[in-house]
Amino acid sequence: MKKYLAEMIGTMVLVLMGCGAAVFAGADQPFFTIGTLGVAFAFGLSVVAMAYTIGSISDCHINPAITFGVYLSGRMSSKDALMYMLFQIIGAIIGSSILWFLAKDSGSTTTLTGANGFAEGKIAEAFVAETVFTFIFVLVVLGVTAKNGLNKFAGLAIGLALVLVHIVCIPITGTSVNPARSIGPAIFEGGVALTQLWLFIVAPLLGAAISALVWKGITVENKLATTE
């Protein structure tokens, strides 16, 4: 139970800090100057902070896509995977509720929770972006956390990878690559955020599945190369 609670807390922090930066740095807010780069670093630094806080307890997935990729890679049981995802979603909902409470009187005309979304007619671009960027992100996670990986600074590498993904993907979808991060804000945002939510669940999980398959292929090839 401790590792499940750790995942809940970590995901709550990620959503509160990352989405909070997006909400309070909106174009109609006084701190607009932090822009895309500031929001990207808010998400990345949240991961870094939590990685070194709860990493020794739960490995700090705080993302159902990561958990799915780790599960498909054979590194965790189906029970743990399902419980991780459940508590990650609960954590995201808690973080979103706090953010909604803080932002409800802010006067924001864009978003009160940092919900993901895509422009009308851009569903294909959004789906490809979320799939590809989740693939890249989860592949980094699988690589730096492998037993023979360069994992001394895994938390930093993962956090910076998330920053990089956000810099490119924010203009397209607001960047999810994390179903829990999308579910929590969408519940409180409602409307279009809820109708588009399916994409931010399906695409990241698909990207994670692809990354697991690719990682298995890479590691098998590496094993063969070392035995030849």
Image (cartoon, rainbow, N blue to C red):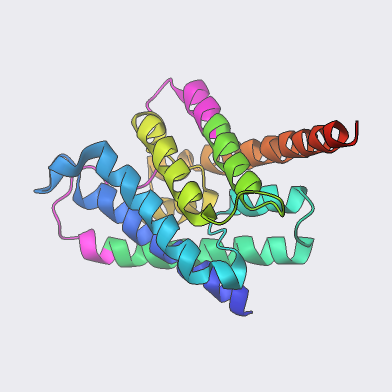
Direction right: furthest residue:
228
Specify whether 51 is left or right of 185: right
Q: Residue at x 82, y 32 (%)?
A: 221
Could you tell me if residue 118 is visible in this image?
A: no
Percent of width and height locating residue 117: 40, 37
User: Is 51 above or below relative to 40?
Assistant: below
Residue 20 at x, y percent in the picture? 28, 55
Q: Is residue 26 left or right of residue 227?
A: left
Helix, strand or loop: magenta stretch: loop
Residue range (magenta): 101-130
Foreground of the two, 109 or 36: 36
Whether residue 87 sits left or right of residue 121 in the image: it is right
154 or 91, which lies in front? 154
Q: Front-most of 42 and 105?
A: 42
Q: Residue at x 60, y 79 (%)?
A: 2
* Vertical position of residue 195 compared to residue 221: above or below: below
Q: Quadrant of residue 57?
A: bottom right
Q: Is residue 190 above or below residue 167?
A: below
Instruction: Give the residue at the far left of this rendering.
Output: 30
Residue 107 in magenta stretch: yes
Q: In the rendered image, which quarter is residue 192 located in? A: top left
Does the magenta-highlighted stretch encompass residue 127?
Answer: yes
The answer to whether residue 126 of the structure is visible from this angle is yes
Q: Quadrant of the N terminus?
A: bottom right
